């Protein structure tokens, strides 16, 4: 039966833990430069409507190192939902390739692609969520912290696609998650309510970052104006005043906390150079682990493990 990875909740809690174990094993194989080619003679179609650095590099490099061939399809190659219906292009790409990764603006386009594709579809990001990123974040936390016991993650900034995926994770893995954001930048209400109703984690929305970060194991942020929102950047800077992750906010946790950012960062805006370059910062481990956890996800949905 075909498996997709569109939301973190597509995996059970056991499957999430299994994915971390696979990722750690494949990461170790890569570090040892082992010959490991489970995707020999396989092809990955990478469909992009959003620009990318980490997503393209991590998927293309990872799939290639596992013996496969990755094909980049940018906005000028496929005008998703414009030149051709999503359901048509999904069926065509699936006839040529073994797996599809899509990084799109419109989440509905991703859902349609998965519905009509005969091969697994992996969500490389949409405006609604970013599941591979949060899987990489959790793997990084596991590496640095050793476990998820009594884990408190405080996200400071816009209630965006990153927050939605953290809330999805909270439906599967017990944690205390707080989104500290201005009142008119809260996450999707249904996604928040679903996480709360699952009864597995403690989830909160706060409008006071200094109070929210008390006792945080992880302080997390993202750009205040994501791709497609740059026209709002100046207005958002005004609305997010007081939500910058700086040395003062990191000190307000009252403990030795880690700092995370999904990147790219606008240094001096949502966070400072001093935090990004501090000992607390694990952002580049986090970025590297995108490749390793995505490799594990591809292996899993393609039945290679």
Image: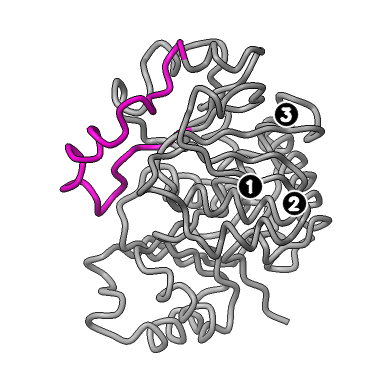
Magenta stretch contains residue 253:
no
Please give left or right for residue 199 compared with residue 90 in the image.
Answer: right
| Residue 121: percent from left, percent from top | 55, 70
Q: What SS does tag 3 mark?
A: helix
**Which badge, 1 or 2, is on the more N-terminal residue?**
2
Point 66% across, 25% down: residue: 217
The residue under label 2 is 19
Q: CB under 8 Å between callouts 1 and 2?
A: yes
Dot 1: within a 10 Å radius of its alpha carbon, few (fewer than 14), some, or many (20 or more) residues? Answer: many
**Which badge, 1 or 3, is on the more N-terminal residue?**
1
Please give left or right for residue 102 compared with residue 145 in the image.
Answer: left
Cα separation, mark 1 vs mark 3, equals: 12 Å
Point 42% across, 16% down: residue: 246
Please state the extent of the stretch shown in magenta in the rendering.
221-248
Magenta stretch contains residue 226:
yes
The residue under label 1 is 135
């Amino acid at each position: 039966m075909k498996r997709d990875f569109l939301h973190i909740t597509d995996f059970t809690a056991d499957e999430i833990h299994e994915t971390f174990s696979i990722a750690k094993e494949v990461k170790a194989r890569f570090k040892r430069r082992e010959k490991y080619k489970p995707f020999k003679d396989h092809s990955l179609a990478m469909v992009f409507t959003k620009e990318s650095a980490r997503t393209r590099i991590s998927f293309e490099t990872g799939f290639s190192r596992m013996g496969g061939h990755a094909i980049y399809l940018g906005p000028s190659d496929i005008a998703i939902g414009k030149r051709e219906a999503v359901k048509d292009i999904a069926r065509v790409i699936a006839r040529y390739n073994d797996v599809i990764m899509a990084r799109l603006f419109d989440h509905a386009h991703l859902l349609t692609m998965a519905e009509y594709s005969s091969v697994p579809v992996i969500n490389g990001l949409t405006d609604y969520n970013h599941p591979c990123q949060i899987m990489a974040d959790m793997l990084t936390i596991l590496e640095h912290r050793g476990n998820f016991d009594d884990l408190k993650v405080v996200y400071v900034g816009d209630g965006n696609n990153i927050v939605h995926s953290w809330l999805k994770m909270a439906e599967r893995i017990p944690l205390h998650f707080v989104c500290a954001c201005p009142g008119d930048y809260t996450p999707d209400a249904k996604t928040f309510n679903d996480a709360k109703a699952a009864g597995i984690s403690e989830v909160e929305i706060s409008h006071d970052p200094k109070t929210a970060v008390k006792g945080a194991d992880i302080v997390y942020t993202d750009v205040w104006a994501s791709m497609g929102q740059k026209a709002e950047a100046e207005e958002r800077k005004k609305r997010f005043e007081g939500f910058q992750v700086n040395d003062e906010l990191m000190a307000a946790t009252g403990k030795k906390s880690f700092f995370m950012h999904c990147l790219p960062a606008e240094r001096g805006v949502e966070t400072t150079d001093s935090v990004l370059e501090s000992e607390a910062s694990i952002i580049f481990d986090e970025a590297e682990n995108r490749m390793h956890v995505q490799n594990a996800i591809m292996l899993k949905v393609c039945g290679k493990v």
